[in-house]
Image: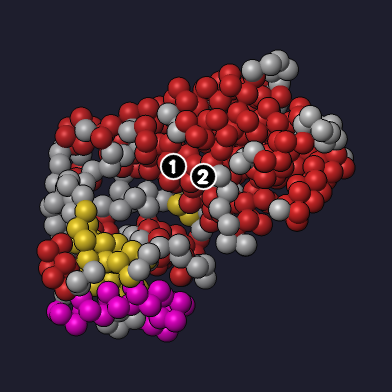
Amino acid sequence: MFSFLKKKASRKPVVYKRPEHCISRKNIDPEALKVLYRLSGLGFTAYLVGGGVRDLLLGRKPKDFDVGTSAKPNEVRQAFRNCFLIGRRFRLAHVRFGDKVIETATFRQNSQSVGEIIEHAAEGPVEDNTFGTPETDAYRRDFTVNGLFYDIKDFSVIDWVGGMQDLKDRIIRSIGDPEIRFREDPVRMMRAIKFSSRLDFKIERKTAAAMKKLHSCILMAAVPRVCEEVFRLFTYGHSREAFLQMWEYGLLGDLLPELSQHITASGGKKSMTWRYLEILDQYETMMAGRGLDVSNGLRAAVLMTDMFRAEHKDGAGRKVMQTMVDTLKIPKATYFTAVLLMESCKRLSSPPNKGKSRFIYNKDFLDALDYNRIVLRAEDKDEGVLNAWCDLYEEKGSKE
């Protein structure tokens, strides 16, 4: 058995008292505080855990607030009438406040052998009902910056894994041996890239070396999880850097070999693919500022645009998008939207006329406008004709 999975000698964590960190309760979701205080008041250990702690320490607004606790799932359910248990391999408690969910998990530990981990790698990450301690829970997490806990009792940050120093040094480092951790769950390699690009952190040397060595293991991971993680790379307006790293580490070649080969043949780091993604990132940032989402069809179309425009033939949109269907099993709705957006370029390249103008009633017309604007701006081309289409849409809308 690999040494990482052997029982570790217990050691004391580094505890950062309230004056030594920047987390304030006013920046923590009030419903998450309710869960923390309720569990703590009942005598259980209850910590804010994971990415929420990381983002608060970085002065960012967390997307989610997750709780780790010594309370067993049924004990959490007994503490909250608005609690529902989910999962089979590992029971999670979802405490609901309207549309909001505070995910609450019992501290746990890995109980499988390395052979079992590798045998079941395609099923997803290692999850089971072996409960543990805060220490074992910290060590089973993916990266040190995600292994920090915030204690509601004394407002301290508890660090078992060296995550506080790596936050200061802006480093993504695997907890334990990265080769073992990536064999356990190959999707962690994509998560390393996601955090690196989103936070502008550098991937630590041993972690990066393991990714370069084991990138093809991503093909052992469950396809739906991989597909989900691919689209998460677009969020937060850092897709250019994320997919550039995917290409450099070899993961893009494993998942979308035709696209990777096209990027290499079209200039590598100078490929127009990166320019299209750069403009998409600006669009994503603008939409997020307005509280709006970007469709995965638009994201997929932009990612494949340079490959699509290199084809110069009818049906090219279907051909290039088929590569994402074959390997990532993207939903049909995403596929058809992406194809429509790509093929809208020809239609929207000339001024609207009586025969073409009905396109403004298509449900994907606004996405088509945005897609074409992204393409034109990436290629530094005039947007006058596209503005005429936009004016027509607004004119028709004002009359209805």
Q: Residues within 10 Å of mark 1 (few under 14, many from 20)?
A: some
Count of marks, rendered view? 2
- Along the viewing direction, whichever of 86 and 379 lies nearer the viewer: 86
Q: Is residue 381 visible?
A: no
Instruction: Identify the image's colour scheme: rainbow, by chain, secondary structure or one colour.
Output: secondary structure
Badge 2 marks a residue whose secondary structure is loop
Q: Is any part of residue 295 visible from this angle?
A: yes
Residue nearest the observer in this picture, 268 or 6? 268
Q: Look at label 1 and name its amino acid.
A: Glu
Q: Say whether marks 1 and 2 touch (CB < 8 Å).
A: yes
Q: Does the magenta stretch include residue 76?
A: no
The residue drawn where x is 16% and y is 34% is 116
- Residue 140 is situated, as x and y percent measured from the top left of the image, at 26, 52
**Residue highlighted by disc 1:** 229
> What residue range appears in magenta?
16-43
Quarter-wise, where is residue 326 in the image? Answer: top left
Let me know if residue 29 is in the magenta part.
yes
- Residue at the image point whose x is 44% and y is 25% from the top: 327
Q: Distance between the residues labelled 1 and 2?
A: 7 Å
Residue under numbered circle 2 = 233
Q: Residue at x 51, y 58 (%)?
A: 170
- Identify the residue at the far front of this view: 400
Kindly state the secondary structure of the residue where label 1 is placed.
Answer: helix
SS majority, magenta: helix
Image coordinates of residue 3 in percent, x first then y, are 20, 43
| Image quadrant containing the N terminus | top left
